[in-house]
Image (tube, rainbow, N blue to C red):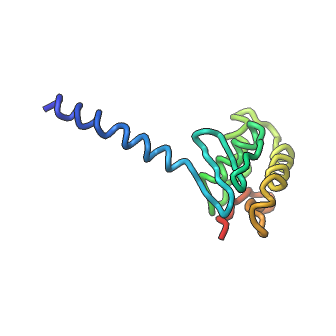
């Protein structure tokens, strides 16, 4: 019986991997975000993001439509020793907004003052 289970797992493993990879690709209007390959594209053109910008975007996109607290973003991107990095976060969010501004008329990243940020799902 253990041999049968091992064979079934071996057969299912590639299928599960493909499904997981597909789950990490997000499309909003003409914007495509691939969390697996760390790529962001707008109208099939790559958008260059710094490592920090990509980490912030990945955290927001993974929680699209939900409020992501500033402290959560700071810990995810800068780690536990982020200190008072709220100003850095505001700068990076501003850079992301500028780079993604051609995607939709409405901003994709909205601010909840002094609380956090939300990645709005584009229509």
Residue furthest to the top in view is 3
Q: Is residue 30 above or below residue 14?
A: below
Q: Residue at x 64, y 50 (%)?
A: 33
- Measured as percent of width and height from the top left, residue 32 is found at 64, 53
* Camera-nearest residue between 101 and 45: 45
Horizontally, is 69 left or right of 88 in the view?
left
Tally of numbered tags:
0
Quarter of the image containing the N terminus?
A: top left
- Measured as percent of width and height from the top left, residue 30 is found at 68, 60
Q: Which residue is drawn at 76% across and 36% down?
A: 82
* Picture quadrant where residue 5 is located: top left
Q: Which residue is drawn at 50% across and 50% down?
A: 23
Quarter of the image containing the C terminus?
A: bottom right
Q: Is residue 119 above or below residue 84?
A: below
Residue furthest to the front in view is 44
Q: In this view, does 114 lie above or below 81?
A: below
- Measured as percent of width and height from the top left, residue 37 is found at 61, 39
- Measured as percent of width and height from the top left, residue 98 is found at 84, 54
Q: Which residue is drawn at 76% across and 46% down?
A: 47
Horizontally, is 82 left or right of 88 in the view?
left
């Amino acid at each position: 019986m253990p041999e049968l289970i091992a064979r079934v797992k071996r057969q299912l493993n590639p299928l599960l991997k493909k499904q997981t990879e597909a789950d990490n690709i997000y499309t909003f209007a003409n914007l495509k975000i691939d969390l697996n390959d760390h790529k962001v594209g707008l109208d099939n053109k790559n958008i260059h993001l710094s490592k920090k910008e990509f980490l912030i975007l990945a955290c927001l996109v993974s929680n699209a439509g939900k409020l992501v607290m500033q402290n959560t973003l700071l810990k995810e991107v800068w780690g536990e020793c982020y200190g008072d990095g709220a100003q850095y976060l505001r700068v990076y969010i501003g850079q992301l907004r500028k780079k993604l501004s051609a995607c939709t008329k409405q901003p994709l990243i909205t601010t909840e003052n002094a609380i956090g940020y939300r990645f709005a799902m584009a229509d």
